[in-house]
Image: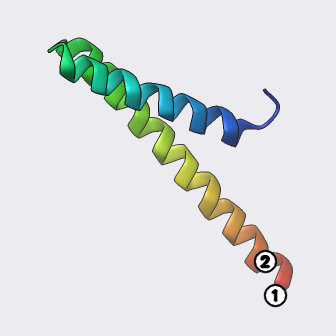
Amino acid sequence: MKDIVKLRVLNFIGCALFTAYGLMIDAWPVVVTNGFIACVNVYFLAKMQNEKKANRVETTA
């Protein structure tokens, strides 16, 4: 995929679904691993969003 944001969003959705699945079958390694990866995706998505906002402010100033 060329768009890293779409890739991270898709990966986050997959991780969230696997986390829910892990909770349903009481598989804690699945929950912890996918929950951690989901958090990493959210962190990088937020970081990219903040950088995008900062770039907009710099170009308008």
Type of amino acid under label 2: Glu
Please, which residue is most extreme toward the left here? 26
Type of amino acid under label 1: Ala
What residue sits right under mark 1 in the picture? 61
Q: Name which quarter of the figure residue 58 lies in.
A: bottom right
Secondary structure of the residue carrying tag 2 is: helix
Q: Name which quarter of the figure residue 23 lies in.
A: top left
Whether label 2 touches label 1, CB < 8 Å: yes
> Would you place residue 59 above or below residue 45 in this image?
below
- Nearest to the observer: residue 13 or residue 47: 13
Please, which residue is most extreme toward the bottom here? 61
Q: How many marks?
A: 2
> Would you place residue 6 above or below residue 23 in this image?
below
Label 2: how many residues lie within 10 Å, few (<14), some (14-19) or many (20+)? few
In the image, taking residue 21 as reference, residue 46 lies left or right, namely right
* Residue 10 placement (x, y as % from top left): 59, 32
Q: CA distance from mark 2 to mark 1?
A: 5 Å
What residue sits right under mark 2 in the picture? 58
* Residue 47 placement (x, y as % from top left): 56, 54
Name the residue rendered at 37%, 21% in the picture: 18
* Residue 11 placement (x, y as % from top left): 55, 29
Secondary structure of the residue carrying tag 1 is: loop
Q: Name which quarter of the figure residue 59 lies in.
A: bottom right
